[in-house]
Image (spheres, rainbow, N blue to C red):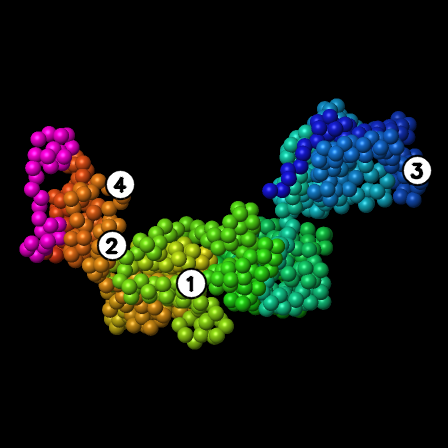
């Protein structure tokens, strides 16, 4: 972990602020002297309170003449002794491994001496309330008792040249207000309000509430205090595949040749757009600022105000503006898109647009400033190269990176997070990646982290081999699909598997075990919420489920899939046409999805034939044989279960039950034993539980079948009875 810097001694902090406040106080004293001198010059005429005389007008012209030397008296330079004392305090703090708070803040926000003095001047009323009437006196308005931009300029920049030079530093796009160190009444927007004007100069200023505690006692983090909310920081390392880098370079050349160019990069997933926008700006030699959250805007005027301020800040600071556009495609966002287009078409600022789907307003296309590129998701080899770039400092096993690149389609932000988590958490990369990809709760699906492994799955040898082949095929599929070219012509971008068989034969459990073997979450679609009676809603819900699985790398499971993937029929009613449209949409969505999708069904014949042709793997789960049932019975009773030792589980394997049936019998027998206050799960409890299970399955036990399974009922003698009775009664 990085070393936490020491906090400087309180005496050193107080001494440093006293030194710096001394310079500000001298500037206040000089400003008061200038004010008194001017007042004396203008107070010689009896009617001066009521009018401006000719003599006063000449004096005012002399005082405001920028070429006159008498107005060049600025703040006194710091005495040599004070400068040396400040250096000594810094040396003492450095020896203790600390930094003086004002110096730390100045370094974090890149403040110069004038900006630091302006902060201290605004802090002065908190240190001494007597400053309030003094401020009113200096600006010739005794009702104005709080610091303002006018006051700061009067005290710290008395000459016209200094005033002109320092005015932007106190405006909405100067570091003090842009970083939120100085707050101006009536301007809560982090991008600032209008450019400085007469009203703006007289609006009261106050320091950020957390600032006094930091400057006086060192309490706080300068990195959090000095934060520019509009600045876009480039991620490190920048992760883009070769094709996207080339497209970014072409867009950067467009921006370099157009002073107010608009560069659009489409087709990238959300986690790649930050890297792409920064790559375009870096190669064009631009810094980037972000747009405010336009979703918070309630009407077109709000959009124009927020986006207009962002564009104005970019123009003043000489940067570009990054605008993600995906939200503009929503039908209920057209008014926001129209307001944004109106501003972008008139602005003289470089703009970088990014989005999954192209956004092409005609006003931008016809402006002569627009250029676009479309990029796709990186293939297996490109993902492998990105892993090399992200793990340069750790030097991991190349075979591990091969496997990760094949199994996961991580965005740059996810990839950096996985590497960072592995380093900080001291874990292997293949452990960190699933944690980064842990699927967030989904509206239409149940997210489950697999807890059961291959030892919990009891299948015949052939089916067990097929599940293992499916896991291996998923790892090998990127190479076969992307490098060898089988993906586009053979059943789409991802692998699809169909599990068929009777209920209780392990289909859902096999999907969970498969997800665990691949190190991904299981996303089980809730069909009750997915299927809707409203036209178009089912397709929208299914698209959301597919998108969630693709974004998180989860295995997408459709349990009882024949409810959604059923056969298309003849159109005899209006609803039949829409049902067929849903099936047609599912065919297309299933084919183009890169996710691993598993469908389970008890009745394969109910599925549309067009679906079954799109499965690379079809696994038929049969009822377990006696060998598998023997294992199932041993697994059904936990080690702590009080099973009667006289019972033989090997005989129970003769009963024709599925895995789910065996588990249900064991659970029912345990409940019966607990209800009867029995010390053990005995023969009578198993007999009743087995009979119930057969009745539930609408099946009949053949004569003598239970006796052959459980063996002959033991004859209980006195000793046995005493042992079996939990209370020791005969």
Quick one: label 2 or label 1, which is nearer the N terminus? 1
> Are the residues tagged 4 and 1 within 8 Å (C-beta)?
no
Q: CA distance from mark 1 to mark 3?
A: 77 Å
Q: What secondary structure is found at the residue carrying circle 3?
A: helix
Quick one: label 4 or label 1, which is nearer the N terminus? 1
Q: CA distance from mark 2 to mark 1?
A: 33 Å
Quadrant of the rendering where the C terminus is positioned: top left
Q: Nearer the viewer, residue 109 or 65?
A: 109
The image shows residue 151, relative to residue 610, as above or below, that is above
Which labelled disc corresponds to residue 247?
A: none
The reply to whether residue 503 is visible in this rendering is no
Q: Read off the residue under disc 3.
A: 70
Q: Read off the residue under disc 4.
A: 640
The reply to whether residue 459 is visible in this rendering is yes
Q: What secondary structure is found at the residue carrying circle 4?
A: loop
Q: Nearer the viewer, residue 431 or 628?
A: 628
Which labelled disc corresponds to residue 631?
A: 2
Quick one: label 3 or label 4, which is nearer the N terminus? 3
Q: Residue 219 placed where, x, y %? A: 65, 32
Which stretch did the figure color magenta?
701-730
Q: What secondary structure is found at the residue carrying circle 2?
A: helix
């Amino acid at each position: 972990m990085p070393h936490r810097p020491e906090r400087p001694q309180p005496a050193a902090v107080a001494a440093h602020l006293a030194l710096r406040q001394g310079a500000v106080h001298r500037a206040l004293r000089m400003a008061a002297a200038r004010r008194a001198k001017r007042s004396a010059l203008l107070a010689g005429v009896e009617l001066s309170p009521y009018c401006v005389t000719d003599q006063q007008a000449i004096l005012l012209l002399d005082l405001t003449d920028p070429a006159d030397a008498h107005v060049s008296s600025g703040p006194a330079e710091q005495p040599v002794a004070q400068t040396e004392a400040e250096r000594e305090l810094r040396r003492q703090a450095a020896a203790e491994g600390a930094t003086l708070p004002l110096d730390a803040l100045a370094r974090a926000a890149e403040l110069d001496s004038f900006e630091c003095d302006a902060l201290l001047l605004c802090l002065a009323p908190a240190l001494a309330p007597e400053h309030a009437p003094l401020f009113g006196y200096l600006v010739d308005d005794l009702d104005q008792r709080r610091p303002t931009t006018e006051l700061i300029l009067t005290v710290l920049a008395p000459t016209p040249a200094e005033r002109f030079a320092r005015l932007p530093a106190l405006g909405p796009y100067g570091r003090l207000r842009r970083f939120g160190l100085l707050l101006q009444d009536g301007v809560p927007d982090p991008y600032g309000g209008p450019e400085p004007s007469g009203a703006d100069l007289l609006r009261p200023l106050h320091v950020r509430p957390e600032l006094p505690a930091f400057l006086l006692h060192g309490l706080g983090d300068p990195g959090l205090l000095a934060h520019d909310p509009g600045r876009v920081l480039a991620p490190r390392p920048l992760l883009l595949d070769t094709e996207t880098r080339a497209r970014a370079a072409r867009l950067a050349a467009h921006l370099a040749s157009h002073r107010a160019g608009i560069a659009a990069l489409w087709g990238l997933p959300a986690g790649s757009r930050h890297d792409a926008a920064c790559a375009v700006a870096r190669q064009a030699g631009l810094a980037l600022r972000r747009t405010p959250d336009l979703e918070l805007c309630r009407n077109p005027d709000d959009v124009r105000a927020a986006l207009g301020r962002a564009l104005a800040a970019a123009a003043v600071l000489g940067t570009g503006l990054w605008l993600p556009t995906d939200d503009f495609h929503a039908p209920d966002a057209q008014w926001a898109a129209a307001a944004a287009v109106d501003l972008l078409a008139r602005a003289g600022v470089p703009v970088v647009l990014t989005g999954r789907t192209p956004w092409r307003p005609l006003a931008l296309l016809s402006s002569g400033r627009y250029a676009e590129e479309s990029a796709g998701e990186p293939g297996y080899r490109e993902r492998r190269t990105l892993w090399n770039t992200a793990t340069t400092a750790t030097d991991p096993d190349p075979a591990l990176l091969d496997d990760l690149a094949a199994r996961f389609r991580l965005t740059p932000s996810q990839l950096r997070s996985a590497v960072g988590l592995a380093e900080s958490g001291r874990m292997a990369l293949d452990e960190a990646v699933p944690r980064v990809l842990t699927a967030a709760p989904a509206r239409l699906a149940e997210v489950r982290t697999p807890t059961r492994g291959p030892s919990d799955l009891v299948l015949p040898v052939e089916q067990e081999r097929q599940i293992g082949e499916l896991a291996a095929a998923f790892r090998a599929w990127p190479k076969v699909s992307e490098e060898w070219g089988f993906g586009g012509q053979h059943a789409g971008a991802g692998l699809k598997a169909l599990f068929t068989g009777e209920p209780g034969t392990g289909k859902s459990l096999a999907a969970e075990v498969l997800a665990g073997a691949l190190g991904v979450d299981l996303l089980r679609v809730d069909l009750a919420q997915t299927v809707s009676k409203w036209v178009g809603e089912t397709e929208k819900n299914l698209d959301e489920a597919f998108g969630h699985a693709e974004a998180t790398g989860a295995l997408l499971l459709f349990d009882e899939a024949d409810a959604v993937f059923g056969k298309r029929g003849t159109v005899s009613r209006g609803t039949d046409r829409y049902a067929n449209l849903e099936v047609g949409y599912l065919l297309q969505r299933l084919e183009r999805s890169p996710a691993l999708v598993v469908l389970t069904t008890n009745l394969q014949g109910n599925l549309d034939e067009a679906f079954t042709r799109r499965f690379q793997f079809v696994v038929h789960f049969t009822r377990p044989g006696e060998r598998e049932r023997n294992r199932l019975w041993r697994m059904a009773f936990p080690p702590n279960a009080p099973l009667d030792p006289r019972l033989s589980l090997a005989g129970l394997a003769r009963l024709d039950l599925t895995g789910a049936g065996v588990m249900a019998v064991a659970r029912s027998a345990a409940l019966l034993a607990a209800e009867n206050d029995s010390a053990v799960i005995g023969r009578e409890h198993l007999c009743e539980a087995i009979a119930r299970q057969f009745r539930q399955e609408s099946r009949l036990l053949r004569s003598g079948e239970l006796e052959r399974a459980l063996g002959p009922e033991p004859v209980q003698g006195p000793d046995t009875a005493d042992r079996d009775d939990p209370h020791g009664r005969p």
